[in-house]
């Protein structure tokens, strides 16, 4: 009688969704080296600033159709949209790496949502150059450098992107409770816009979750180290290839 061997599941494709005003270049810094080390195909996504959520969901749908199971790699609003998609596509998701989530459900009053509304207003009233100077003056250098590049690339649709993000009420608590794929959260201690408490709130309601916490300054010094830590937590706790 021939021996039957268990067939390995397909290798997932890592699809990286950036935060508001950010882009594929930062996601390549954050998760690209870890995906390469794990041998996973890697697809960093640039948002359509006029349709952020729709463009992210289209990228996830395309990756699932073309490659198979998706490992969602999100940052800020990318984590929100990616986790919501994962909750609705359980058979197409291998896991979610959700860095710096900012709220759960209704964004009203959340620091990141208020910041997005303020930024959209500033961009419309003062234009890109003035807004860049204001952002650079109020941000750590590592944030300012990267956002200067991505804001410029996404202009003139950038105000619409920030408006949309400020109203994005996903995922809900019910969606997280229904999320069957494993989720590893990344929290940056000391980040006033993406408080670690938001990530811990997600963790408390997830059926299968883990969390990696690092100082905000440490994330800025070497984003790839943060990405490696989150990736390795997923692979050691949950991955079965």
Image (cartoon, rainbow, N blue to C red):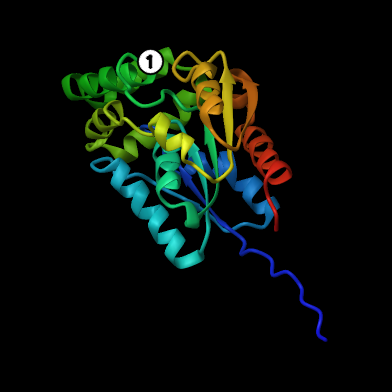
Image: 149 above or below 125: below
Q: Residue at x 23, y 38 (%)?
A: 157
Q: Position of residue 5 (x, y in %)?
A: 76, 73
Q: Position of residue 231 (x, y in %)?
A: 65, 42
Foreground: 157 or 107? 107
Q: Residues within 10 Å of mark 1 (few under 14, many from 20)?
A: some
Q: Residue at x 70, y 51 (%)?
A: 37
The mark total stands at 1
**Can residue 18 be seen in the rendering of this structure?**
no
Image: 212 above or below 44: above
Residue 68 shown left or right of residue 56 in the figure:
right
Q: Residue at x 65, y 46 (%)?
A: 34
Disc 1 marks which residue?
Answer: 111
**Can residue 70 be seen in the rendering of this structure?**
yes
Residue 139 shown left or right of residue 38 in the figure:
left
Q: Residue furthest front?
A: 1
Foreground: 220 or 81? 81
Q: Position of residue 114 (x, y in %)?
A: 31, 16
Image: 117 above or below 20: above
Q: Secondary structure at mark 1?
A: helix
Q: Position of residue 217 (x, y in %)?
A: 60, 19
Foreground: 72 or 124? 72
Q: Residue at x 56, y 13 (%)?
A: 190
User: The N terminus appears in which quarter of the rendering?
Assistant: bottom right
Q: Residue furthest bottom?
A: 1
Give the image quarter of residue 65.
Answer: bottom left
């Amino acid at each position: 009688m021939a021996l039957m061997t268990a067939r390995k599941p397909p290798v997932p494709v890592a699809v990286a969704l950036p935060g508001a005003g950010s882009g594929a270049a930062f996601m390549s810094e954050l998760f690209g080296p870890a995906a390469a080390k794990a041998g996973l195909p890697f697809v960093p996504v640039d948002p359509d600033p006029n349709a952020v959520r729709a463009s992210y969901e289209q990228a996830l749908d395309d990756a699932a159709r073309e490659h198979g199971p998706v490992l969602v790699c999100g940052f800020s609003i990318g984590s929100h949209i990616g986790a919501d998609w994962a909750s609705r596509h359980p058979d197409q998701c291998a896991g979610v790496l959700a860095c710096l989530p900012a709220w759960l459900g209704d964004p009203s009053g959340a620091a990141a949502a208020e910041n997005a509304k303020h930024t959209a207003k500033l961009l419309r009233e003062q234009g890109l150059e003035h807004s860049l100077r204001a952002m650079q003056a109020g941000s750590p250098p590592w944030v300012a450098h990267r956002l200067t590049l991505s804001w410029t690339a996404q202009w003139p649709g950038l105000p619409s992107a920030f408006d949309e993000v400020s109203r994005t009420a996903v995922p809900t608590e019910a969606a997280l409770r229904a999320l069957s794929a494993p989720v590893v959260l990344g929290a940056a201690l000391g980040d006033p816009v993406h408080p670690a408490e938001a990530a811990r709130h997600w963790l408390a309601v997830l059926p299968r979750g883990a969390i990696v916490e690092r100082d905000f300054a440490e994330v800025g010094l070497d984003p790839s180290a943060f990405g490696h830590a989150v990736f390795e937590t997923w692979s050691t706790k949950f991955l079965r290839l």
